[in-house]
Amino acid sequence: MIITDTHTHLYSEAFDEDRKETVQKAIDLGVKRFFIPAIDSTYTERMLALEKDFPGQMFLMTGLHPTHVKENFEEELAHVEKMLDNHTYYAIGEIGIDLYWEKKYFKQQQIAFRKQIQIAKKYKLPIVIHCRDAFDEIFEILEEEKSDDLWGIFHCFTGSYEQAKKAISYNMKLGIGGVVTFKNGKIDTFLKKIELKHIVLETDSPYLAPKPYRGKRNESAYIVKVLEKLADIHGVPNEQIALETTRNSIAVFGI
């Protein structure tokens, strides 16, 4: 059984004391593929080191996270393109709009999101979307940019059934993580109506640990709890969830 974690920040300082052991724990449970989203240029070297330390298992993305969009966002986007010209990346992410923490740079977030979609099209890569309190704003830009060469993942999907269907209509898979195990997560109430071909698994570690680890540091190993919850919701064996979601991740990332 091969499980794919499509979104894990294993380069985070949260793993500095036990990164090797944390990765090995996940591997021992069947997690063989780790897709690594970017935040901003300050993490580039840590990401490259992670890839070097675990060859053939870590697949990097590049991009500018919406909460890190500031006055210098143009410089950050130039860094993204420079890295794309000098290294192999498998997606542009995580990118999007976040209006939960602050709205000061909302306009810049919109510009950065649109420009990174265009970069993804230029390099024929998928996008990985971060959306918090911004479904309408995200959908507005996706509607303007939609095309056959735009596809990817709606990371950490926490919207409604209608929003899920809309995200899928833009060639996006739904990234399902620990929230599906939360009592107040709500997405578990409609996920059975979403075909498995539209779903990928993720942890977003070290954030959003699933039950029974909620409130603790999340790890890629805990993706098993997400898998088990999805298997329960859809009434299928764990192995089928692993097979189909890994197959979906291959369709997105091309590897």
Image: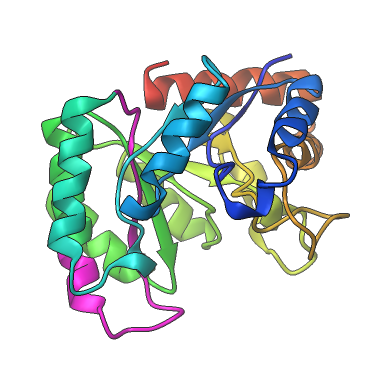
Q: Is residue 40 visible?
A: no
151 or 163: which is nearer to us?
Answer: 151
Position of residue 158 measured from the top left corner of the image (x, y, whole percent): 56, 60
> Image check: 180 left or right of 75?
right
120 lies left or right of 198: left
Question: Which part of the image, by quadrant, shows the C terminus?
Answer: top left
Rendered residue at 30%/62% (across/down): 138
Q: Residue at x 30, y 34 (%)?
A: 126
- In the shown orientation, is residue 134 left or right of residue 219? left
Residue 135 colored in magenta in the image: no
Q: Position of residue 178 (x, y in %)?
A: 70, 52
Please give the name of the residue rendered at 28% of the width and 69% of the height, measured from the top-left corner.
137
Q: Nearer the viewer, residue 146 or 126?
A: 126
Q: Which residues are magenta?
A: 88-111
90 falls in the magenta region: yes
Is the image coloured rainbow, by chain, by secondary structure, or in one colour?
rainbow
Write down the quadrant of residue 241 in the picture. Answer: top right
**Number of numbered discs:** 0
Q: Is residue 72 visible?
A: yes
